[in-house]
Image (cartoon, helix red, strand yellow):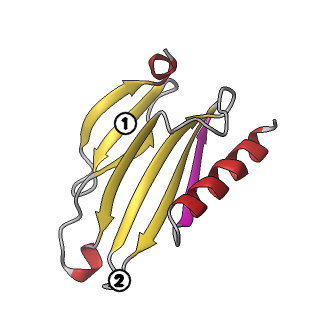
Amino acid sequence: MASSQVINSIISKYETYNGKAIKQGIFEQGDWVIIRMVKEDPREESFMNDYLFNVTSWKPSDPPLLQSDWTDNFSKGVRDGGFKLEFGASDELLELSAFDGQVVKRHVLSSLLT
């Protein structure tokens, strides 16, 4: 399955799984993809989820290799909480504080497949 087909399949799965979740972004690095989804509750708070997948090894039954969750409520004067995923150097994944963007944890991408 081509990379774009895999990504579209993953998005479809998580839009269905999360009900009214909406894709907010796709971030690719080599064979890796982070899919960012957002879901707003009735109070208009934004709940964000990042899902990390390896496109070449992904199967429809596979869970994300890593997932992070955070709230995005800074515009309402509320401190953002949780962690975001972001690609670093060529084989690096970073977990960043949603509040201040500081690196909380580093992962070697290739080690997540073992």
Which residue is painted at 50% across and 63% down in the image? 18
Residue type at tag 1: Leu
Query: Magenta region, mostly helix, strand or loop?
Result: strand
C-beta proximity under 8 Å, tags 2 and 1: no
Q: Which residues are magenta?
A: 22-30
Quarter of the view holding residue 6: top right
Residue type at tag 2: Glu
Q: Nearer the viewer, residue 60 or 6?
A: 60
Q: Label 2: few (<14), some or many (≥20) within 10 Å?
A: few
Q: Mark number for residue 44?
A: 2
> Judging from the image, what secondary structure is the residue with disc 1 in?
strand
Q: Provide residue 80's location: percent of width, then percent of height.
A: 23, 64
Q: Nearer the viewer, residue 32 or 19?
A: 19
Q: Provide residue 93's location: percent of width, then percent of height.
A: 42, 32
Left or right of residue 109, residue 71 in this image:
left
Q: Mark number for residue 94?
A: 1
Q: Provide residue 84's location: percent of width, then percent of height.
A: 36, 49
